[in-house]
Amino acid sequence: MDELADACISGRLIPVVLNNTSIVEFFLNSKHNTLRSIWSYIILAPNATVPLSLLLSARLPYSTWIAPRKHLIFLQSKQGEDKIFIPPDTEESSLFTSYLATPVRKGFKNKRLFQQL
């Protein structure tokens, strides 16, 4: 996260996020200084065509598309691994994590099944 912020501040990287998504909410609700710093450099894209064309143009400064990993993997499969780089799925390369919360009543009998999701 700090490296991403440094790259944005130095002008080496332009972060792009689709407007009206949960990622926008994530940045807006964050109290973390590094995330607020990244937010100040983010370009909000109206649709997926904008960040995809920026990624594929490979012009300096480079663009980075902040999106859910599965979405980026799908785009990579369509465009080619040589066109879109997705870092390994590690804690260091993740900007945020997602959790699935499912409300259940107090006496729910199959609670253990949900621990494996």
Image: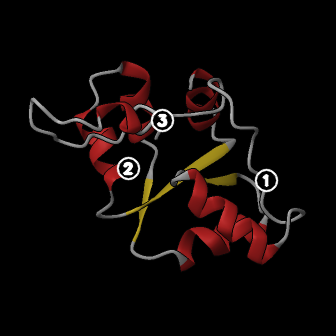
Q: Does dot 1 land on a helix, a strand or a loop?
A: loop
Type of the residue with mark 3: Gln
Please say which color scheme the image uses.
secondary structure
Along the line of sight, the residue nearer the viewer: 72 or 32: 72
Q: Indicate the quadrant where residue 53 lies.
A: bottom right
Q: Does dot 3 land on a helix, a strand or a loop?
A: loop
Q: Does dot 2 land on a helix, a strand or a loop?
A: helix
Cα separation between marks 3 and 2: 25 Å
Residue at the image point whose x is 58% and y is 21% from the top = 2
Q: Residues within 10 Å of mark 3 (few under 14, many from 20)?
A: few
Q: Residues within 10 Å of mark 1 (few under 14, many from 20)?
A: few
Type of the residue with mark 2: Ile
Q: Give the percent coordinates (x, y) of residue 28.
A: 26, 40
Residue pointed to by mark 3:
116
Residue pointed to by mark 1:
85
Say which label, 1 or 3, has the lower sequence index.
1
Which residue in the rendered view is the most extreme toward the right?
82
Along the line of sight, the residue nearer the viewer: 7 or 76: 76
| Mark count | 3
Residue pointed to by mark 2:
23
Residue 24, placed above or below residue 99: below
Residue at the image point whose x is 65% and y is 45% from the top = 13
Say which label, 1 or 2, has the lower sequence index.
2
Say which label, 3 or 2, has the lower sequence index.
2
Q: Which is closer to the viewer, label 3 or label 2? A: 3
Q: Give the percent coordinates (x, y) of residue 43.
A: 45, 57
Residue 43, placed above or below residue 110: below
Which mark is on residue 36?
none
Type of the residue with mark 1: Phe
Which residue in the rendered view is the most extreme toward the front?
109
Q: Give the percent coordinates (x, y) of residue 89.
A: 69, 37
Residue 81, placed above or below residue 3: below
